[in-house]
Image (tube, helix red, strand yellow):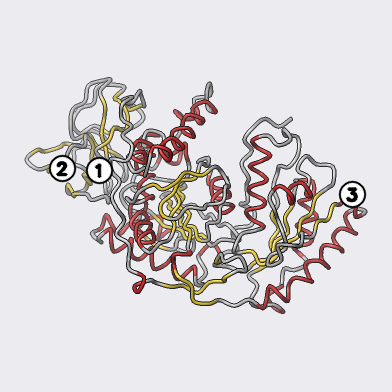
Amino acid sequence: MATFALIEKAILLRAEDDVAIARAELPAGTVLEDGAARIEVRQDIRPGHKVARHAVRAGAPVRRYGQVIGFATADIAVGDHVHTQNLGIGELSADRYEVGVDVRPVDFYPPDQMRHFDGYRREDGRVGTRNYVAIVSTVNCSASVSQFVKEKFRDVQREYPNIDGVIAITHKSGCATKLFGEEHLALHRVLAGYAKHPNVAAYIIIGLGCEVNQAAVLVDRQKMAVPGHPERKPTILTIQETGGIRKTIERAVAEVAKVLPAANDVRRTKQPISELTLATNCGGSDGNSGITANPALGWAVDELVRYGGTGVLAETPEIYGAEHLLIRRAVNEGVAKKLIDRYKWWEWYCRGIDAMDNNPAPGNKAGGITTVFEKSLGGVTKGGTTPMNDVFMYGEPISTRGFVFMDTPGNDPVSITGLVAGGCNVICFTTGRGSVFGCKPVPSIKLATNSLVYRHMEEDMDINCGVIVEGTPLAAVGRQIFEEVIAVASGKRSKSELSGVGEEEFAPWIIGPVM
């Protein structure tokens, strides 16, 4: 797990690094003591940005985390601000893939030391952390009707206090795409994954009737059924067959009303934390992300894995340049190949538009991240240090425990939609710029990478990981995250839940062309 040394007002992550990270504003002329060396800062450098420790010639690699984060595009002098004006990406060594060399056996806790949380055990054995009823829209054309039905149950907790809410799963897709093409099948996985999610007690499906994404086909291909009754198919309503908007709303409201009493009857019971599947994601990353929140979350993932739980890393474009570190943790060649295949697919997918090269986003760059390699090296630390046991397609049910990877885009709502569809029942979301992301029906815990953002947005941030650069041990913050995961899984409301955020963020991946 990441450790670092302090150079007065800067952070040194590895002795071999060419850069240090500013902890505070470094005006030009500031002198930093770096061991026996003295670094005179040559330009004003903002917190989270990089100052050169070594002179680097144009074309030579620049290292942070002990890894290459890019190549100098101009000569860099000691004390220079290292950023977009003098650092870019280039070709990494082709022989950097070493399968499994960092695999170490997991030090599992013995059964008598198992921790527990209060969760909802469903009839199929899976365990939820929330208790929702869902209205699933097959296509954008039925989205408004689905929302109208949901509005009829805005105050559902008055009569049914054990139900967290009635939500509408609506989106912008479902038609004008290739029948059973890659995008259509991904949408199938996502809609079925939400409907069958352990946080959903019951659901109905609403379609238009003429769309590509036919409701009856979705149900058959995804083996969807009434929760607790695998022999019964779920309720399907189509606007065209039912007779229009008003009639569909009336029918749907009646169908939802039928399932509320049974959904309200379920209760939380003591469950092992091995039943937790934790989604990890980052958004609005900054120069502190790979120093504070991400490695602290990685510590919590390692701890959950030691209890037999599951931690999931995702965002394939944001492991670009760091994928070799995951390959070193792959349990076998097959798992490594799965990841490499998805990585190569992304290179093909982004061909001709320089999408990978243009990552990070403007907000990332303002926070001190210069290249996608640097962003990726900080991002992979969310996945901790245990072996990578499997790699899953977008929205595919997560069937392997331990640390695993899911292929998703870097776009936060799209990424987490896939993770939730895969079965994740808690989310930890690291942010340096201040994301307020929520994701019903799964609680989202916000981890601020720096104290400034935490104080400025305290109503939206759950944990301040910025205290790590102020002297708090990383493991102590990792433990705080881990305990918060258990508390939120047991019913404590996260900040995004308290704000009511999380329903509009459902965003299935639109992979291919819209016809």
Q: Amino acid at mark 1?
A: Leu
Circle 1 crowding by C-alpha within 10 Å: few under 14, some 14–19, many from 20: many
Say which element carries label 1.
loop
Which residue is drawn at the image coordinates 12% and 43% (left, top)? 33
Q: Which residue is mark 1?
A: 26
**First reached walking from the N terminus: tag 1 or tag 2:** 1
Which residue is drawn at the image coordinates 63% and 51% (left, top)? 506
Q: Is residue 164 left or right of residue 154?
A: left
**First reached walking from the N terminus: tag 1 or tag 3:** 1
Circle 2 crowding by C-alpha within 10 Å: few under 14, some 14–19, many from 20: some
Q: Are marks 1 and 2 in contact (CB under 8 Å)?
A: yes
Residue 121 x/y as whole percent: 57, 70
Mark 1, mark 2: which one is toward the viewer? Answer: 2
Say which element carries label 3.
helix
Figure check: 159 above or below 474: below
Q: Amino acid at mark 3?
A: Gln
Q: Toward which corner of the image does residue 127 lie, by quadrant?
A: bottom right
Which residue is drawn at the image coordinates 29% and 64% (left, top)? 476
Q: Which residue is mark 3?
A: 240
Q: CA distance from mark 1 to mark 3?
A: 65 Å
Q: Is residue 380 left or right of residue 56?
A: right
Using the image as rendered, state which of residue 30 and residue 392 is in the foreground. 392
User: In the displayed image of the protein, which residue is found farthest to the right?
Assistant: 243
